[in-house]
Image (spheres, rainbow, N blue to C red):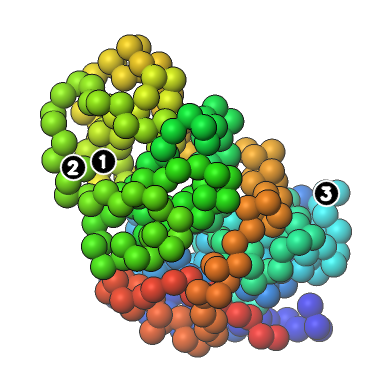
Amino acid sequence: MDNQSNYNAFRVEEKDGSYISSVKKIPFTTLKKGEILIKVHYSSLNYKDALSSRGNKGVTRNYPHTPGIDAAGTIVSSESEKFKTSDDVIVTSYDLGMNTDGGFAEYVKVPEDWVVKLPKNLSMKEAMTIGTAGLTAGMSVLRLSEMVKPEDGTIVVSGATGGVGSTSIAILKKLGYKIAAITGKETEIDFLQKLGADEIILRKDFEEMAKKPLLKPLFAGGIDTVGGVILENIIKATHPMGVVTCCGNVASPKLELTVFPFILRGVTLIGIDSQNYPMIYREKVWNKLANKWKNNQLTEASSEISLDELNTKIDAMLQGKLKGRTLVALKQ
């Protein structure tokens, strides 16, 4: 810990109903059994972090707080039998950055069960470019690919320009799948085609499909990131024995469906809970992302900022003006 008693962290404080965020010095605390202290090299800015930074109690209940749902760094102190000092590691999701102080700090303390060793063929910067969104995409592709093969037909991906959707398309393309991308952004069609989408479906057209219990089978499977009517129509338009994964509800958490897609076509719906997904899957996905699924385009499209620049970037994200992945580099 470089003989320090304090370290820098991006702290959000509640004062008279307002939320103020700034870089502050905070003290180290004692490790309990099974905990590790990580010297953070990189974190990344996610939408949950932006909400937490502005006092969203649905993300973070109590303040002061340090956001940052992703972190990559080196262990400097360990009370764990699983990890030792000098191990390079990744921590994403669980409660990190939500109600447990997160990665927008020079150091982060976490339970051993939240930690994955950094794969050999992956840098910390690459890991944070992938982050929770890329891990969620990897989990979705892994579960779908266990049951649906490229020769079975087209895979449809919703929210295609988002972090989960775009990474899913890139991975699916590497695996040889034919891909249909659903998007509400007509200006991003070229981007999606370069990413690997074979077909572009406009969201408004897909939402307006016939209100029937079953639709014409169009897809061998799907990766849905938005929920609502989009997910309903993906399920209803999936081939017999097809597989659909779902991981988001930005459109709606509700589904208005009959059981017909499931009992007449044998469609399987798999939920992806990246926050608490089993470690056996996390390790498998991270190793695939470091090797067979590796995508250098993601790193090339990212930008780096310091803790001091976070407030400006958070405002831009909440205004919908931020593009690409924003990495937080902890220069120490």
Alpha carbon separation for disc pair 1 and 3: 42 Å
> Three-letter amino acid code at disc 1?
Ile
Q: Name the residue under label 2.
A: 207
Q: What element carries label 1?
A: helix
Out of 225 and 38, give the one closest to the viewer: 225
Q: Name the residue under label 1.
A: 230
Q: Pick the quarter of the image with the C terminus.
A: bottom right
Vertical side of 287 occupied by 154: above or below: above
User: Residue 250 at x, y = what percent?
Assistant: 29, 50
Q: Pick the quarter of the image with the N terminus.
A: bottom right
N-term-proximal mark, 3 vs 2: 3
User: Residue 67 at x, y = what percent?
Assistant: 49, 67
Is 255 positioned to the left or the right of 204 in the image? right
Residue that appears at 58% across and 39% down: 142
* The quarter of the displayed image where residue 39 is located: bottom right
* The quarter of the displayed image where residue 25 is located: bottom right
Tell me, yes or no, if residue 307 can be seen here. Answer: no
Q: Categorize mark 1 by other alpha carbons within 10 Å: few (<14), some (14-19), many (20+).
A: many
Q: Are marks 2 and 1 in contact (CB under 8 Å)?
A: yes
Q: Categorize mark 2 by other alpha carbons within 10 Å: few (<14), some (14-19), many (20+).
A: some
Alpha carbon separation for disc pair 2 and 1: 6 Å
Q: What element carries label 2?
A: helix
Q: Categorize mark 3 by other alpha carbons within 10 Å: few (<14), some (14-19), many (20+).
A: few
> Three-letter amino acid code at disc 3?
Lys
Vertical side of 63 occupied by 266: above or below: above
Q: Name the residue under label 3.
A: 82
Tell me, yes or no, if residue 72 can be seen here. Answer: yes
